[in-house]
Amino acid sequence: MASFIPVLSPSDIQRAAELIQQAYAPQTHLSSEDQRRTQQELFEIQKRPEAWGLVLPFLDHSDPNVQFFGAHTAQVKIARDWAAFPEEHVLELRDMVLDVTGRSMGSGKNKVILRKLFVAVTSLALKIAPGNPSRWPDWLMSCINTMSGLGATNEQIMDFLAIVSEEVESADLLPASKIQVQSSLGSVVPIVVQAITSCITVPQALSAPQQLSSALKCLQAWFPVLPANDLTPLIPLLISLLNPTSTTPMEFDETAFVGASETLQELMTKSALADGSANRTLTEPLLIWCHAYGGRIVEETLSSGLVDPVSHSFCKLLVALGDHSTLYLAANIASALPPKPFPEPPPPTTFPAPSLPNKSQLVQAFLRLLLAYAALPGFYGVDEEESELSLGFWYLFQEALWSAEYEQEFEFGDGDVDAAPGTDKTEQAQMRVARVVYSELVQILRGKVVWPGAATLRTWNRDQRDKFQAYRRDVGDILINAYYILRDGLLAYYVSDLLQRLSSRSPNDSWEDIEGTLHCVLAVQEAVPVEDNLHLARIFGPEIMGRLPVTGSDRVRRTALLLIGSYASWFTTQSKDASPSTSLLMNAISYIAAALPDHVLCLPAANALRDLCDANRTALAPHIAAFGELHASLTGIPDTEKAKVLQSIASVIQALPPAEAIPPIEAILSPVVAKLHEALQSSAQLPEEARAITIQQLVTITGVAKGLTRMVDSLLVVDETPSAQEEAKQMVQARDDPRTTQLREGLLFAIRRIVELWTEDASVSDALNELIKAITSLPTDVTLISLPPGPLLEAVCMAAQKQLTAVWLSLTTMLINQLDPPSLLPTTFKTIPTHEAEQIALSVLGVLLQTSLSALSQPDALEANPDIVQAFFGCIDTMAQHFVIAFYRLPPDIFNALMQCSITSLGLQERYSLVGACTFCRTLINRTCAVDELSDAKIMLARTHGPSIMRAVLSGFAGVAPRSTTPNLVELLSTLTQRFPEDSRQWMTEVLFADDFVQCKANDAAKEQLIKAVFGSRSMRRVRDAAQQFILIARGLEGTGFGYTSVTM
C-alpha cells in the first residue's frame, strides 16, 4: 500500500467489509432499522481520515459490493474531504488513483465500479489541473495513455471520456478554472473524434454492439464540447447506422438503430448544430433517409399493431428533426427545387436507384410520417404512447409558416420553382399545402380525443383516465394552432362532422363521437374572434344544439355546457331583436336550465349560466321574468350551485334601471338573509349546523354582490354623460328605498353577529372576507346592496381584537382606501378626506395599533408571523397615505411604540416584513413633511426617531439585513437625507463611528467615503452606488466574483 495512505489493521478492514456485505448482500434480510444502523456506521467510517486506507484493500476484495464501496470511498474523499488531505502528497495520490483505475479497467471490473473510479479521477483532475503552474498538465491525455497502457479497452476509454465531459460540464468552478479545464478538453478533441469514428463506422461497428453503445454515449456527452466542423463528418456515419440490415423483409439492428437515433436526437438539441443550422449536412440527409425507409417502418408498425423499439425511436427522431428544422420544413413545404445534401447520400439498396425527390416531396413525406404516428390506432396512454410525442411540433410549425417568408430570403429555398422567394405566389403555395396538412391533422386529432365506450372505460385505471384527459387538453392547445392556419375552415369541418353524425346516428348509438367534436370546438374558443360567425350560429342553433340530449348522456351534455360558457361573450354579437323562440342566447339559457336539476351536471350548468349572464346582461334584461321562474324552480339544487345561479340572475338584474331592480333583488336576497339570521339565532343549540349554513349563505350573498357589480371599471372609464348622471341619481333614490335599506341593515346586523360568534373560525373568516370585498365599492360603483366602509371597519376591528390575522388587516387596508376614495378626474392636489372619515380613521387606527402592537411585542412574534407583519405594515402605510394627521393625534406612547416596532422590523431577516417597514417609514416621513399643519410633528419625528431609523438603515447595510432588501433601505436613506439633510449628516456620522456600531469589515475610510458620496450628490443613482459599494466592503465581498454578480440593484 502507498506509504502516504493511512494503514488500517486487517481486522478493521475485515469488519468494514462484513458491514458492507451485511447491508448490501442479496442473501441477507435485515430489518429497516438494522439496515439504517449499518448504513450509518458505514457512513461514519467513510468520514474518518483513515478511510483512505480502505480504497485499495476494498478494490482488491472478491465481493463486488465491497469493491464498489472502495471506489465510492475514493470518490467521496476527493469530493468532500479534499481540504483535509496533505498538500505534499497530492501528486502521489494522483498517481495512485490513476493506477488503480487503469488496473481495474484492465482486470474487467464491473462498469458500475469503474464509473465511480472515473468520477474520482475526474474530480481529482478538476481540483489539481487548474492553476498556473498546473499540477496535472495534459491530464486527460495522461489518463488516456495510462489507462491504455494498463489494458483498458476502447469501450472503457469511451465510458471514461463520457464521464469526463459530464463532470466538467456540471462542475462548479471559478471562471478562470472553468476556461482552463474546458481548454484541456478542447486539446484532445481530434483524438476523441478519431476514436469515436473508428467505433461507429459500419460494418465494423455492428460486430461490437457494447463498444458501439459506449462510443455513442461518449459522443452524446461530448456534444457541448465538439465544434460544428468536427460534428459534420460524424453525421453520415450516424445515419448509416440507421440503415436496415435487410430490406426483404425490412430488418434493423435494434441496438445500432436506437443508439444512433438517440445520438442524432441529442445532436439536434444539445450540440453546436442545435439552432436549426446544417440544412445540407443534417436536415436534408435525414429527410432523404426518412423518405427512403420511414414509410416501411410505419407500414410495419400498422400491420403488426405493435410499436417496437425501432419504431418508437424513429418517432422520437422525427420529432427531434421537426423541432430542429421547423423553419426549413415551413419554407420548403411547396418547393420544387432539388435538395443538395452534403455529402451525397449513398443510393438506396433497390435497383434501379430512384431519382432524388425534390424538397417539397421530402418535406411532405416527413409530415405524412408524423401524421401517421399522430393517428396510431387505439387510445393514448392505454394502447399506445407515441401519438402525443408529435403534438409540440405542430405548434412550432404553425409559427414557422408565419415567419417562413422572411427566412426564404436567406437559405431555406422557395415555394415554387418559377417564383422568387418571398413573393405572393410562394406564400400562396406554402399556405395551400399547409392547409391540406393541418386539415388532415385536425381530422386525426378529432378521432383521437374521442372517449371509449362505457364498457371499455370501466377497464381503465385512474392513471389511464388522467393521462387521456391530459392528452385531450394538449390536443386542444394544438387545435388553436390549427385554427390560425385554417380559420373558419376548421369550424366548417366541425359543423359538417356534427351534422353528419347527428343525421346518421341511431337511438342506441353512443354520443362519444359527437362529444369529441364538441370538445374540439371548445378547445379553440380563445382563438376565435368575438364576431358574428355562421358556423357558431349553426352549432348553437336548432341544427346541432337543439338535437343534443337533455337527459342522461352526462359527458356530451357536460361538454355542451362548457361550450356555452366558454363562448359566452360570442353571444353578444347576436341580434338583440330576435324573439325568445329564435334567440340563440335564450336557447342556450334553456339548455342550461334543463341541466341545473341534474346533480351530476349542476356545477358546469351553474358556471355556464353565470358566464353567459355576466357577458349578456343587457340582452337578457328584458327576459327578467323568465329568470324569476328559474329562481322559483331552484328547490332541488345544492346551495353551492344555487349561489352561482343567483349570481347569474343578479348579473341580469344589474342591467335593469335601479328602481326596477329592487323587487327581483329583494326576491332573491331576502330569503337568503332570513336563512342567515335563522342560523345565527340557532347557533347556541346547533353550532356546527348553524356554522355550515352561515358559510353557505355568505357565499350566496357574495355571488349576488359580484353579479350586481358593473362590468366596466369606473376608474378606467369616466362617464360624465347626462344619462350616466341620471343613472347615478336613480341609484341614490333606489338605495334610499325602504326595501333596500332594510336589506343592507339586515346584512350589517348579520356581519356584526358573525364577528361576535365565529371570528376565530378560518372558514367563516374566509367567507366573510370574500363577502366584504364583494359588497363594498368606490362611490362610482355603488350597487343597491353596497355597504359603507365605516360600519364594516368597526366590525373588522372587532374581529381583529378577537384574533389578529392578515385577513382582517388586509380588509382594513381595502376599506381605508374606500373611506378616502380617489378622484376620478386628474388633479394636482390630493383630495382632503371628510371630517367624518378622519374621525373613523383615527378610531380605527387606535384600535388597530393597540391590538397589533400588543400581539407583535411578544417575544419572537415579529419573526414568527411574517404574514401578519407584512399585512400590518401594508395597512398602516395605506393609513399614512390617506390620514397621516391621525398618527399625530394618537397618545404619544402608542405612536412611540409603533415607531419602535417599525425600527425593530428594519432588522428582520424576513424580506417582505422588512420591505413593509421600509415602505411605511418612507410614507410617514414624506406625508408628514408634505402637510403644512404638521410642521411641529416633523420636528418631533426627526428628533425622536430619526437617529434610530438611520442606525437601522446603516446596520442593515453592514450585514444585519438581507442583501435583497438593499434597494428598499437605500430608498429610505435617500428619503431621510432629502427631508432632513443637516440632521441626517450628523446622524450618519454618529452612527457609523459609534463604538457600538455593527461589527463589520468597513474601515473608517470606507465610512467617510459613504458619507461623502451620499451628501455630495442629490442623485439617487449616486446614493445607490455608494451604498452598494459600502455593503460589499462591510460584508467582505469587495473584489469577489460573488459580490459583484449578486448585486441586487
Image (spheres, rainbow, N blue to C red):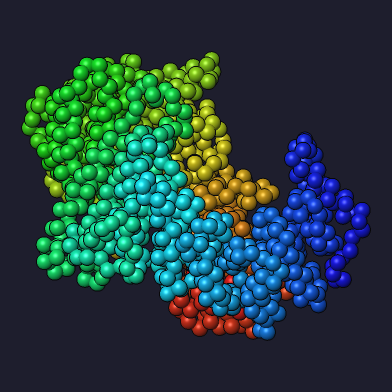
* Residue 678 against residue 328 in the figure, above or below: above
Label total for image: 0
- The answer to which quarter of the image holds residue 793 is top left
* Residue 137 against residue 126 in the figure, above or below: below
Across and down, in percent, residue 794 comes to: 46, 38
Residue at coordinates 55% horizontally, 32% vertically from top-left? 760
Residue placed most toward the observer, 648 or 511:
511
Is 349 on the left-hand or right-hand side of 179? Answer: left
Is 93 on the left-hand or right-hand side of 924? Answer: right
Residue at coordinates 46% horizontally, 79% vertically from top-left? 1018
Is 1029 on the left-hand or right-hand side of 492? Answer: right
Across and down, in percent, residue 882 comes to: 41, 54
Across and down, in percent, residue 515 comes to: 27, 29
Residue at coordinates 23% horizontally, 61% vertically from top-left? 355
* Residue 810 against residue 129 in the figure, above or below: above
Quarter holding the N terminus? bottom right
* Residue 964 against residue 812 in the figure, above or below: below
Across and down, in percent, residue 998 comes to: 69, 70
Report the residue that reaches farthest toward the front: 351
Residue placed most toward the observer, 358 or 702:
358
Residue placed most toward the observer, 94 or 189:
189
Residue at coordinates 13% horizontally, 40% vertically from top-left? 533
Q: Residue 763: in sight, yes or no?
A: yes
Q: Residue 1000: in sight, yes or no?
A: no
- The answer to which quarter of the image holds residue 27 is top right
Is 437 on the left-hand or right-hand side of 64? Answer: left
